[in-house]
């Protein structure tokens, strides 16, 4: 089992390298010359929506059965300290796509937390997505599922480096069209949500039949793998669920002990099994790195229709661990040695890691917040990530370095709760106390000062940009 090698990591990260967002030049992959001559691996990301840290069998759920994900973990790596870039949909997706915190590209806002059907903004075309970066390395690129980085033509996946797109442009609970007085989440029907299903840039179904979306996404993914088996490819599959409203196909009605929510997760698991089987059947398993993770934590206010953060505190929308620490698996038979990894990682790290493995280099004209995890994945080296910055909207609320996390502000989300500004900040040791229950600030004033200084250095690296989420389409 891989364990944290703190002494070696601290040596690698000395001189404050972990205190600032990485400059692009520092992300040029070590060993790029050797990887450039090797066959380029395929990359598949399976990205859930609102999946909780405790919602999978392999992460401890007692009644949700996830045999395919359990097998994926046994054959690959289970990362227990892996973070989304934000605690809500749009900014989190901007982070995974660009390797940059959303504060750097305007994809977070104090006015609107996510994009809506009347939003006028989206991910700027000046941003380099994973798809754009890999197309430059000769990759085919496909996007399936929920996008939520702008629904107007100039912001769609096909304008951001993807050759093809099949999915919905924003969350499955938007464009509500239910009769007055209907509880749209308790008594969910697809026709209550006028969400469009798109192929490339054309709407092919509206409202989308959400009872079949999970199944259709998985089928599209399998077809994409088979169609592109003879070339390097990047496939981004972003499930619409388990974001409420919850839907599943008839084959999965009532199969889970966990009820409707469990049915949804078990159908996603079934799709993962089909995708991994397709890779094996096509002789691509040892050529393909598959990552499974989620955009943020569970939407707890929906009770039994929301997920579980397990032993972590709070959920979606918050900067407590339950809001941003995600159940994460890496799978690459013959390349990745099976392990449980307690080092830190983030969705921000996927772009630099993929580009490195593809033999490329990160552009040098912008600041990146991701790290190349190649050594940690393939060579059992310590993860280069030793810090995490927790934003809520456009403000830094918390920061982690090593096992210690400082909260400058705290507030629950989606319920009435007072904003608390902490002076001195709260301090938790996440190795000893992952549930963030015991404030140890008085015992470690030196650690607290180090974290305060880290936060200040990070904030100094952020250049103001246009808020992409605040604008609305002007009605004529």
Image: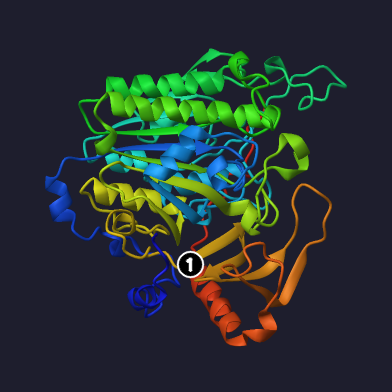
Using the image as rendered, state which of residue 83 and residue 172 is in the foreground. 83
Query: Number of marks in the image?
Result: 1
Q: Residue at x 42, y 24 (%)?
A: 274
Which image quarter holds the N terminus?
Answer: bottom left
Using the image as rendered, state which of residue 362 and residue 13 is in the foreground. 13
Is disc 1 placed on a helix, strand or loop? strand
Q: Which residue lies under the disc numbered 1?
A: 387
Q: Is residue 392 visible?
A: no
Which image quarter holds the C terminus?
Answer: top right
Instruction: Please say which color scheme the image uses.
Output: rainbow
Using the image as rendered, state which of residue 348 and residue 56 is in the foreground. 56
Q: Residue at x 65, y 28 (%)?
A: 256
Using the image as rendered, state which of residue 69 and residue 344 is in the foreground. 69
Residue 446 shown left or right of residue 228 in the figure:
right
For residue 215, above or below residue 134: above
**Residue 152 percent across, percent down from the top left:** 52, 29
**Residue 341 percent across, percent down from the top left:** 43, 57
Which quarter of the picture shows residue 291? Answer: top left
**Residue 404 percent across, percent down from the top left:** 57, 72
**Residue 109 percent across, percent down from the top left:** 62, 51
Residue 263 shown left or right of residue 355 in the figure:
right
Q: Is residue 178 visible?
A: yes
**Crowding near pointer 1: few (<14 within 10 Å), some, many (20+)?**
many
For residue 55, above or below residue 413: above
Residue projecting furthest to the left: 37
Q: Residue at x 57, y 29 (%)?
A: 266
Q: Residue at x 53, y 71 (%)?
A: 403
């Amino acid at each position: 089992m891989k364990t944290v090698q703190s002494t070696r990591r601290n040596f690698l990260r000395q001189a404050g390298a972990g205190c600032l967002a990485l400059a692009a030049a520092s992300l040029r992959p070590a060993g790029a010359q050797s990887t450039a001559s090797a066959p380029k691996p395929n990359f598949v990301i399976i990205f859930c929506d609102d999946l909780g840290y405790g919602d999978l069998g392999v992460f401890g759920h007692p009644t949700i059965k996830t045999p395919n994900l359990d097998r994926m973990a046994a054959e690959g790596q289970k990362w227990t300290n892996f973070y989304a870039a934000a605690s809500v949909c749009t900014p989190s997706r901007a982070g995974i796509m660009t390797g940059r915190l959303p504060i750097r590209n305007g994809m977070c806002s104090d006015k609107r937390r996510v994009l809506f059907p009347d939003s006028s903004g989206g991910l700027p075309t000046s941003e380099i997505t994973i798809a754009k970066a890999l197309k430059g390395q000769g990759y085919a690129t496909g996007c399936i599922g929920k996008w939520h980085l702008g629904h107007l033509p100039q912001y769609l996946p096909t304008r951001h480096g993807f050759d093809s797109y099949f999915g919905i442009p924003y969350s499955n609970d938007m464009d509500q069209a239910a009769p007055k007085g209907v509880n749209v989440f308790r008594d969910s029907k697809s026709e209550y949500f006028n969400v469009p299903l798109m192929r490339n840039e054309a709407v092919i179904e509206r409202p989308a039949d959400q009872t079949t979306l999970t199944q259709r996404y998985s089928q599209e993914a399998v077809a994409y793998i088979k169609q592109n088996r003879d070339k390097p490819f990047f496939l981004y599959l972003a499930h619409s669920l388990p974001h409420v409203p919850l839907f599943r196909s008839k084959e999965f009605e009532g199969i889970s002990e966990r009820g409707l929510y469990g049915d949804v997760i078990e159908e996603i698991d079934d799709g993962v099994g089909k995708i991994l089987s397709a890779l094996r059947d096509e002789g691509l398993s040892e050529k393909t790195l598959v990552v499974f993770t989620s955009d943020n934590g569970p939407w707890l206010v929906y009770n039994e229709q929301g997920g579980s953060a397990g032993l972590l505190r709070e959920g979606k929308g918050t900067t407590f661990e339950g809001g941003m620490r995600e159940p994460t698996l890496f799978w690459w038979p013959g390349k990745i040695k099976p392990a449980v990894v307690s080092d830190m990682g983030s969705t921000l790290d996927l772009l630099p890691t993929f580009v490195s493995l593809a033999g490329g280099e990160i552009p040098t004209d912008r600041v990146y917040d991701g790290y190349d995890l190649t050594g940690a994945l393939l060579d059992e080296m310590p993860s280069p990530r030793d810090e995490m910055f927790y934003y809520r909207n456009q403000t830094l609320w918390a920061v982690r370095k090593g096992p210690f996390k400082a909260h400058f502000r705290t507030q629950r989300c989606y319920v009435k709760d007072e904003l608390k500004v902490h002076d001195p900040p709260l301090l938790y040791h996440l190795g000893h106390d992952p549930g963030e229950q015991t404030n140890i600030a008085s015992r470690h004033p030196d650690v607290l000062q180090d974290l305060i200084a880290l936060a200040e250095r990070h904030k100094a690296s952020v250049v103001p940009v246009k808020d992409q989420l605040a604008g609305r389409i002007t009605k004529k």
